[in-house]
Amino acid sequence: MNNKEVLVVFSGPHSYISPIWYREPNTVSTWNYVAVHIYGKVKIIENEERLLEILEQTVRFYEGKYGENAEMPKNDQFIQGLMKGIVGFELEINRIEGKWKLNQNHSIERQFNTIEGLRKTSDQNANAIANLMEENIK
């Protein structure tokens, strides 16, 4: 697996787009999304100390905002058991591509109609897509 070319996809907000929002005949549903594709060579982290260091940094980063429990026990048997199921890796990045589909190929009127439809949902992804579509129109 080491030094193999891989693609890592980071998905951003995404949402179903209903054809009724276009308010025009002969339209079909679609999906709007934002993603980043990263291509590179992978290196599996086999050193247990390095893997533990990465896990500690990750826990500190995400747990720190919640208060006191930002440190992970180092020599805890439970953590050691969990680490057997974790594969750490580093990526030597060769190329980064941003991908998005935000109805940009549709008329401004259709885009605004879609934004209005997305805003009527309570879905966070739908609202995030609506925000991105508004930014894209500007």
Image: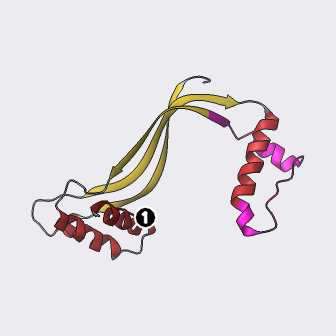
Quadrant of the image containing the C terminus: bottom left
Q: Looking at the image, which residue sits at the far right?
A: 75
Instruction: Check disc 1 and report its element: helix, strand or loop.
Output: helix
Q: How is the image coloured?
A: secondary structure
Of the pair 24 and 101, the residue shown nearer to us: 101
Q: Is residue 64 above or below residue 52?
A: below
The spot of residue 135 in percent (x, y) is 34, 63
37 up-or-down from 120: above or below: above
Res 45 quadrant in image? top right
Please state which amino acid type lies under the numbered disc 1: Asn
**Residue at x-position 45% and y-position 69%:** 124
- Residue 5 vertical position relative to residue 66 in the rendered view, above or below: above
Magenta span has 86? Answer: yes
At horizontal 71% and vertical 66% (from top left) the residue drawn is: 65
Query: What is the quadrant of residue 52 in the picture?
Result: top right
The vertical placement of 93 against 9, above or below, is above
Q: Is residue 78 on the magenta stretch?
A: yes
Q: Residue at x 75, y 56 (%)?
A: 60
Q: In this view, which residue lies farthest toward the left?
A: 25
Q: Which residues are magenta?
A: 63-90
Left or right side of 118 for 53: right
Q: Residue at x 46, y 50 (%)?
A: 11
Horizontally, residue 37 falls left or right of residue 73, namely left
Which residue lies under the disc numbered 1? 125
Question: 132 or 25, which is in the foreground?
Answer: 132
**For residue 34, side relative to residue 88 (left or right):** left
Q: Position of residue 15 (x, y in %)?
A: 36, 61
Q: Residue furthest front?
A: 138
- Quadrant (top left/top right/bottom left/bottom right) for the N terminus: top right
Total labels: the figure holds 1
| Residue 129 pos. (x, y %) | 37, 63
